[in-house]
């Protein structure tokens, strides 16, 4: 009697690295892309998407554990296997001066901590000299999910969101490690593999793809973690000829908006001087119950060396920024995409430690929306070519 073998179902996603990816192993060396890092990213996008469909944290955790596995739940295994092929990826090593970042000062700001922002004779370093390895842009890798049971549509959508507005490695929320999904191939049991999705060729097709995934946005406001909700917004902010131009354009606008600068100048241009109270606080003026408005960009938030100018959550190590920036390749163009995921900023009642003093958290989301929608210090619309892709419960 002939044995019968059950054939698996698989989805293979091909991604292109669009901006340098600062991803590392245990020794912070960019030796490749690990399945664990990809699985972690897929978990994030799956959870962000499914919150609005589930709406209950316990049930969401139950479904996530069943799908992705959980060591806490008696070693529950994932419902699929994940394989990454990222062979022969080239990298730029620690200590090398990155030729593109050397030319783009504002892009270096987005990679703060990953590279030298400015040349220093004292340290013997150059602007754009890397502190961490990075995988170079314009290379591809594949992710294959395989299961003997049908793969859930939510997994496919997570794969797509990962490659439409996501990335890997350090500073992904500042555009580093951005990736573009180029194709999906699927194989059903007893069938040949076939391509089921290809990358958008125009900005309109890109927008339509996002709409297709987020067509049923949750009507729940302010989810308890970074997730899609009625307050989510996605905007196309920049159109550029190179990924570095997109990074630099966004980084420059953020610098001029956020920073006071030296003698009121940033990159030899007058800053917008939007946050005078924050600036005065950093110079030693400590009003009672005050923390800088710019905490909304994420914590910790440091104004200088030492604890006196350190701003951290009272009981947590960090709170990641709710504002994401992603560089996406569409045809021969590179577009800069912002994603704003409003959610509970800190647990109810948690204070912010500002320079050693715990003060009540006063979170102003308008700091981020004013950045996206407002005018610069010359009265010009900051992002003049901005196109709204998703705006709350209304997709347009």
Image (tube, grey):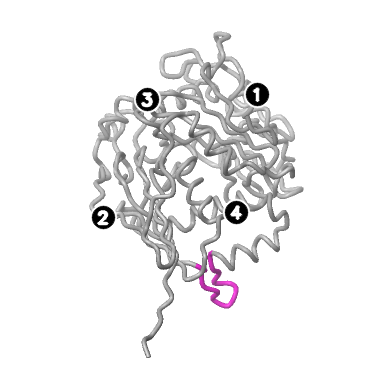
Q: Which residues make up the magenta segment? A: 68-79
| Residue wearing tag 2 | 87
Residue position for label 3: 245
Q: Is residue 164 left or right of residue 318?
A: left
| Nearest to N terminus: mark 3 or mark 2 | 2
Q: From the viewer's perspective, is the residue at label 1 or at label 2 nearer?
A: 2
Name the side, left or right, on which 385 lies relative to 62: left
Is disc 3 placed on a helix, strand or loop? helix
Farthest top residue? Answer: 378
Measured in 3D between alpha carbons, the distance from the residue under mark 4 to the one under mark 1, in whole angstroms, is 37 Å
What is the C-alpha distance between the residues marked 4 and 3? 32 Å
- Chief secondary structure of the magenta portion: loop
**Is 31 drawn above or below residue 58 in the view shown?**
above
Residue at point 40%, 42% (across, down): 177
Checking the image for residue 277, the label placed there is 1
Q: Around disc 4, counting alpha carbons within 10 Å, would you say few (fewer than 14), some (14 to 19), or many (20 or more)? A: many
Looking at the rendering, which quadrant does residue 345 occupy?
top right
Label 3: how many Cα within 10 Å (few below 14, some 14–19, many 20+): many
């Amino acid at each position: 009697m002939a044995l019968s073998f059950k054939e698996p179902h698989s989805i293979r996603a091909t991604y292109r690295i669009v901006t340098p990816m600062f991803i590392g192993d245990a020794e912070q060396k960019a030796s490749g892309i690990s399945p664990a890092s990809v699985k972690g990213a897929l978990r994030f996008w799956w959870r962000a998407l499914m919150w609005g469909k589930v709406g209950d944290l316990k049930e969401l955790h139950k479904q996530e554990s069943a799908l992705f596995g959980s060591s806490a739940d008696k070693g529950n295994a994932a419902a699929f296997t994940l394989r990454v092929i990222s062979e022969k990826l080239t990298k730029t090593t620690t200590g090398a001066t990155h030729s593109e970042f050397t030319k783009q000062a504002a892009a270096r700001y987005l990679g703060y901590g990953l590279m030298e922002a400015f040349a220093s004779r004292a340290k013997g370093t150059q602007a754009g000299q890397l502190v961490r390895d990075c995988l170079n842009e314009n290379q591809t890798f594949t992710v294959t999910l395989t299961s003997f049971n049908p793969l859930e549509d939510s997994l496919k959508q997570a794969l797509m969101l990962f490659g439409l507005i996501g990335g890997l490695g350090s500073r992904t929320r500042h555009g580093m490690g951005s990736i573009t999904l180029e194709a999906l191939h699927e194989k059903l049991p007893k069938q040949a593999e076939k391509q089921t999705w290809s990358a958008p060729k125009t900005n309109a097709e890109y927008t339509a793809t996002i709409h297709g995934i987020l067509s049923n946005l949750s009507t729940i406001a302010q989810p308890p973690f970074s997730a899609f909700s009625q307050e989510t917004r996605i905007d196309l902010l920049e159109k550029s000829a190179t990924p570095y131009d997109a990074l630099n354009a966004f980084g420059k606008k953020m610098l001029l908006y956020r920073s006071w600068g030296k003698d009121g100048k940033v990159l030899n241009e007058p800053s917008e001087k939007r946050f005078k109270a924050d600036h005065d606080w950093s110079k030693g003026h400590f009003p009672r119950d005050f923390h800088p408005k710019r905490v909304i960009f994420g914590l910790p938030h440091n104004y200088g060396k030492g604890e006196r100018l350190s701003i951290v959550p009272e009981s947590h190590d960090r709170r990641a920024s709710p504002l994401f920036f992603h560089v996406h390749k569409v045809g021969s163009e590179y577009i800069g995409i912002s994603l704003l995921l409003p959610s509970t900023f800190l647990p109810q009642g948690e204070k912010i430690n500002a320079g050693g003093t715990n003060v009540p958290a006063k979170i102003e989301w308008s700091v981020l929306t004013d950045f996206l929608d407002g005018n610069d210090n010359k009265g010009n619309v900051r992002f003049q070519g901005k196109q709204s892709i998703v705006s709350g419960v209304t997709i347009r």
